[in-house]
Structure formats: structure tokens, C-alpha cells
Image: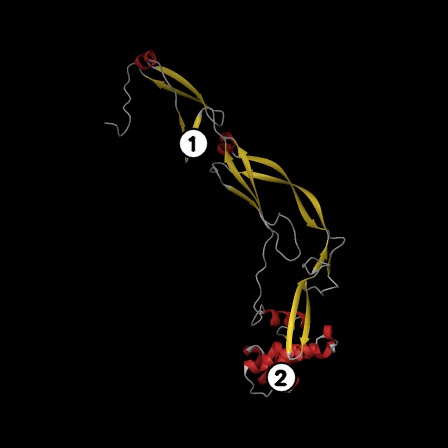
Amino acid sequence: DTTKFYKLLEVEKNASEAEIKKAYRKLAVKHHPDKGGDPEKFKEITRAYEVLGDSEKREKYNRGGEDAVDGDGGGDPSDIFESFFGGGGRRGGAAKKRQKTKEVTQPLKVTLEQLYNGHTKKMAITRKVIDKQKGVQQCSDCDGRGVKVEVIRMGPMIQQMQSACGSCGGQGKSFKTKSEREVLEVHVQKGSPDKHKVVFREMADEHPDADTGDVIFVLQEQEHSVFKRKGADLFLERSISLVEALCGFELEITHLDGRKLLVKTSPGEIVQPMMQG
């Protein structure tokens, strides 16, 4: 049967998109359960609009009836009603991209030795996680929509009033969170640059309506008493006396990995700085 949905909306099979919308608007308000309407009837006309209001689904239905669209959609009638009157409906069944909870960024001070040799630091964080024992419950007052919709009829005029559900604070769900302490091992790789980010995926706060955000540690290179770093190079500056310059000298340097380096200059050796003629 390829006429049932058209009969439910009281339109002809060649009805335009605008005519289908108009028919659904009229019947949805008339049969809405909040206004004393029959919930099953409301569900049927909403399902009919969900199919006929989408050009792709309508074409499938016209060819094969309900069997051809059984696997398409079938969303909550109240959600479809709310989306229709609020103007925020999704067309064509496109999935709404889930947001992430706020990521946590934390600076991590590291010495030049730790950056050169590699290092592992244990960092403790505290985050909010969903209490699995109590679980996530759909709000019974708003049926999980997060809003309450009131339709007011004033003669020929219809007014829709929408407000956040007071029971769940507009969340649509009731859930409990608890604080959980985690110890993360931050591996500082050899040669890591200053401001390098070490990311722990999905370790931020949890929320049932969002993907869990990341925890990010940003390496902060501390000033060294001997060396200065420029890219992959290490620089050491040392003032020498006139006697050392004329007679030569030996300087022992302790490298960042503990090795001893011996720097020698010959008596009277002239060192000409590059690019200085």
C-alpha cells in the first residue's frame, strides 16, 4: 500500500512539499498528547510526515510502501514535532556531530636534561566521571527532550511556548557524576622541543551527551645554568681572561648526559668569528 501515509496526512498523492507541511502542522497540533490527543494517532501522522516530508524517503515509499522505508529513521515523534515547530529539524536523517567535553590543558615544567635524555613524569589529575552504578536515566518530565512544549490555541491562531525542563535543567537526562583521581605517566621523548604537547585522549570530564575531551600537557623548558638551546644545538658562553686568551686554556664541560667534554685552545690561537671578516 503506497497511499496509507497520504491518507493519514489527508493529502493527495501528488501533494507538494508545502501542502504536506501544512497538513502535518494542522494534524500534529490537533492530535498532540499534551492537548489530549491520541498518542498512537500522533505517532502515526508523525511517522507519515517523517517519510513524506523527505524527498528521498518519499520516493522509496511511492515505489514500495512501508516495507521500503522500514529501516529509515523512525525517530521520537515528540522530537520531530519539536524540531518542526522550532525550525531546527534535521533533514534527510543527517547525523548531528557530537561535541566534546572541554579539554584540559596543563603546563609541565621540564629541565634541559630531561628534554635531552628523555624522562617520564607521573602526573595526578582529578576528573568527573559518570557514576556507572546509578547510570543515566531519561528525564520522565520531558521524555528526554530537555524542553517542555506547550501549544496554545487562541481562536484561529496557534502559539507554541517552549521552555527548558526544570527537572533536568534542560539536559534531557538525569545522571550522577563522581570525582575520580587518575595518575598519568607523561613520557618526555628525547629531543622534545619546548611547548611540545603530550596528549591523553578522552581523559577529561565525562558527559552522556558528548564525547570525552582530551587532557594535554604542554612542555615548558626551564632555563639552564650552563647551556642555551637553539633548535637541536646547545650553546655555552664563557668569558676568558687575557692570559687565557694569550696562553691557551683547558675547559672541562659536563654534558647534559653526564659525559665530560674537554675543550682546549693553543697559546696565541686566533679564533676568527664566522661572517665577521
Which residue was labeled with disc 2?
Answer: 65
Circle 1: element type: strand
Circle 2: element type: helix
Residue 265: percent from left, percent from top: 33, 18
Q: Is residue 92 left or right of residue 241?
A: right
Q: Is residue 93 left or right of residue 182?
A: left
Quarter containing the C terminus: top left
How far is disc 2 from disc 1 in space, using C-alphas? 72 Å
Residue 125's image quarter? top right
Outermost front residue: 155
Which residue: 65% across, 66% down? 162
Residue 136's image quarter? bottom right
Asked if residue 123 can be seen in this view, the reply is yes
Which residue: 61% across, 80% down? 68
Residue 238: percent from left, percent from top: 39, 20
Whether residue 64 is situated above or below residue 216 in the rendered picture? below
Residue 17: percent from left, percent from top: 55, 80
Whether residue 78 is situated above or below residue 98 in the rendered picture? below
Quarter containing the N terminus: bottom right
Which numbered disc, 2 or 1, marks the residue that appears first in the sequence?
2
Whether residue 127 is situated above or below residue 277 in the rendered picture? below
> What amino acid is labelled 2 in the image?
Gly
Residue 181: percent from left, percent from top: 68, 42
> What amino acid is labelled 1 in the image?
Arg
Which residue was labeled with disc 1?
Answer: 229
Asked if residue 70 can be seen in this view, the reply is no
Count all numbered tags in the image, as a single digit.
2
Q: How is the image coloured?
A: secondary structure
